[in-house]
Image (tube, rainbow, N blue to C red):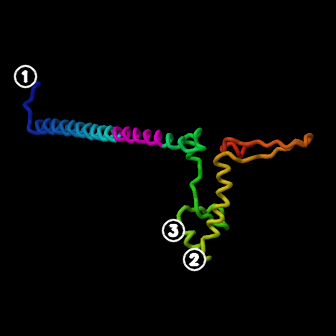
Amino acid sequence: MANKEPQTASTLEEKKKAEVDAEIKQSRQIIRDAEKRIKELKADSTIVQDVTTWQEIQKLKEKTLKELQNIDGCKSWNLTKMMKVPTFFTYQNPDNAMQKAADDTVDWVVKYRKKNNSVAALIETAQKSHLKMVRKIFGRIKKRNRKADDETEIIVEVSDPLISGIV
């Protein structure tokens, strides 16, 4: 019994402080775990909504593809080919072929109208470009190839507008 000393107040306080610190540490760990679980549940909720959105997109794709194939001249088309089709335009700047618009409220169309008091040139330029665009879109471009040793003309009609630039 000589080795055992009576516990003093300071050792009791240290022991109590250590217990409180351990409990605080454990409580903080529980809070971190709970916050992590909340994040996971929120992500799961978002994923469920995303799956629903994906289903709606798929229905829209199927509907669009069905409507696309009901259009005369587009029976063999798919959505990828449709997405590569340029947007239809009513106005095209004769000075800058890259400026095209379907609406007369576009900034450059308004400026052109103010400058020239008319949009007739824009419409005319667009209509001329429509013919070229339609030939590309629907594969109606005819390429002429001539052989050096043969006088006959060979006309190749390209059926796929995506490869028309290659032939």
The crowding category of the residue bearing disc 1, from other C-alpha atoms within 10 Å (few below 14, some 14 to 19, many at least 20), is few
What percent of the width, then of the height, locates residue 77? 58, 40
The image quarter in which residue 6 lies: top left
Q: Is residue 123 left or right of residue 12?
A: right
Viewport quadrant of the C terminus: top right
What percent of the width, then of the height, locates residue 27? 20, 38
What percent of the width, then of the height, locates residue 46? 34, 41
Q: According to the image, label 1 marks what residue?
A: 1
Residue at 9% from the left image edge and 29% from the top image edge: 5
Task: Tell me which amino acid carries mark 3.
Answer: Thr
Question: In 3D space, how far apart are the residues under numbered discs 3 and 2 (Cα atoms)?
Answer: 12 Å
The crowding category of the residue bearing disc 2, from other C-alpha atoms within 10 Å (few below 14, some 14 to 19, many at least 20), is few
Q: Is residue 7 left or right of residue 125?
A: left
Task: Tell me which amino acid carries mark 2.
Answer: Lys
| Main SS category, magenta section | helix
* Closer to the eye: label 1 or 2: 2
Q: Is residue 137 magenta?
A: no
Q: Is residue 22 left or right of residue 149?
A: left
Tag 3 near tag 1, CB within 8 Å: no
Q: Is residue 54 magenta?
A: yes
Between discs 3 and 2, the one toward the N terminus: 3
Q: Is residue 74 left or right of residue 3?
A: right
The image quarter in which residue 124 lies: bottom right
The magenta stretch is 47-63
Viewport quadrant of the N terminus: top left
Task: Tell me which amino acid carries mark 1.
Answer: Met
- Vertical placement of residue 34 versus 141, above or below: above
Query: Helix, strand or loop at disc 3?
Result: loop
Q: According to the image, label 2 marks what residue?
A: 114
Question: In 3D space, how far apart are the residues under numbered discs 3 and 1 (Cα atoms)?
Answer: 100 Å
Residue at 80% from the left image edge and 46% from the top image edge: 144
Q: According to the image, label 3 marks what residue?
A: 105
